[in-house]
Amino acid sequence: MDKFIIKKKKFKVNNPVLIEGLPGIGNVGKIVVDFLIDQLKHELVYEIYSKSFPHSVFVNEDNIIELPKVDIYKVSIKNRDLLLLSGDIQPVDEESSYEFSNLIVDIAKENGCKEIITLGGIGLNSEPNAPKVYGVANNSKSKEKYKKISGNVNFDKVKAEAIIGATGLILGIADLKKISGIGLLVETFAHQFHIGLKESKELLKSIKNIFNLDIELSDLDKEIKQEERNKAKNLQKQSKVLSKTVKRIHAKGSDTSYIG
């Protein structure tokens, strides 16, 4: 098997920009891109398979297996097209991550992309109440341009010293190949099971501002409220269990002066 197997559909693009949203901290980039795909009329134009992806298959609802893959969708908006990079995985070892990122930049260049936007999370020790969005760029011209039009993005305060994986490497390799790029990074909880819906909304606001998109965020609001209700229920359950445990400990011996 070749390193990459690419299935490509014939399509035309108008002044395209590639937006990457692959799994990462809080899965914020993936949530944003998947939301855009759901909200906007789209066309699947690339399917990318690789032996550098996890050595497993997914089993869908019909018990049919599917190889891990990364997709690129074309979305047409006013005066330009978006190429949305989405998937459930990305390479994890360093060499494969470089090769994959280089492939994505080559695809972007082949289709006439002069700009690339990557999306990711900044991991915090706890869940942020009011997540902030920070911006990085691979050149000063792009930084100044998107600083003016992105709205809620802070391009002046450095919040991340390094960006791991495709979100960072795509920008770096794009610069080598004369493609401008920015990365939008939102604060999120750095827990492996955390799903950053609230944080993703802040990224979506930035993308909406940049491209003047006609998208409704109400569906995401519903999911955020449901997630908060679920968290409240879980905390209630944990509190009840802890309360019962403490009562049992005290009942076993009144001379117990500590819990260890």
Image (cartoon, grey):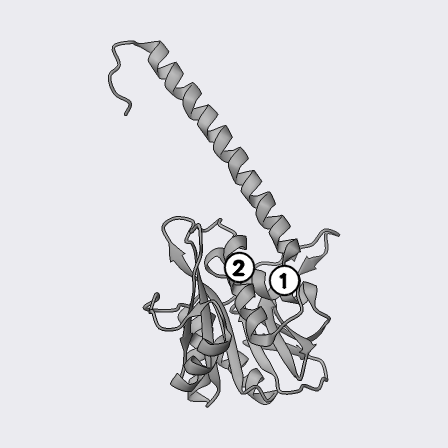
Position of residue 171 measured from the top left corner of the image (x, y, whole percent): 44, 78
The answer to whether 105 appears left or right of 123 in the picture is: right
Q: Are marks 1 and 2 in contact (CB under 8 Å)?
A: yes
**Residue 197, how many percent across, how many down?**
54, 54
Residue visible at 44% across and 54% down in the picture: 130
Q: Which residue is mark 1?
A: 35
Disc 1 to disc 2, how far (Cα)? 10 Å
Residue at x-position 48% and y-position 34%? 235
Q: Position of 101 compared to 87: left or right? A: left
Which quadrant of the figure contains the N terminus?
A: bottom right
Which is nearer the eye, 172 or 57? 172
In the orientation shown, which residue stands out farthest toward the right?
62
Q: Earlier in the sequence, mark 1 or mark 2?
A: 1
User: Residue 178's spot in the image, x, y percent?
Assistant: 46, 90
- Tell me if mark 1 has few (under 14), some (14-19) or many (20+) residues whose alpha carbon lies within 10 angstroms of its own: some
Marker disc for residue 200: 2
The residue closer to the viewer here, 152 or 238, is 152
Query: Is residue 58 left or right of 99 when viewed as pictured?
Result: right
- For disc 2, the neighbor class at 10 Å (few under 14, some 14 to 19, many from 20) is many
Front residue of this view, candidates 234 and 52: 234
Q: Is residue 202 visible?
A: yes
The amino acid sitting under disc 2 is Ser
**250 is higher (above) or lower (below) than 164:** above
Residue 175 locus on image (x, y percent): 43, 85
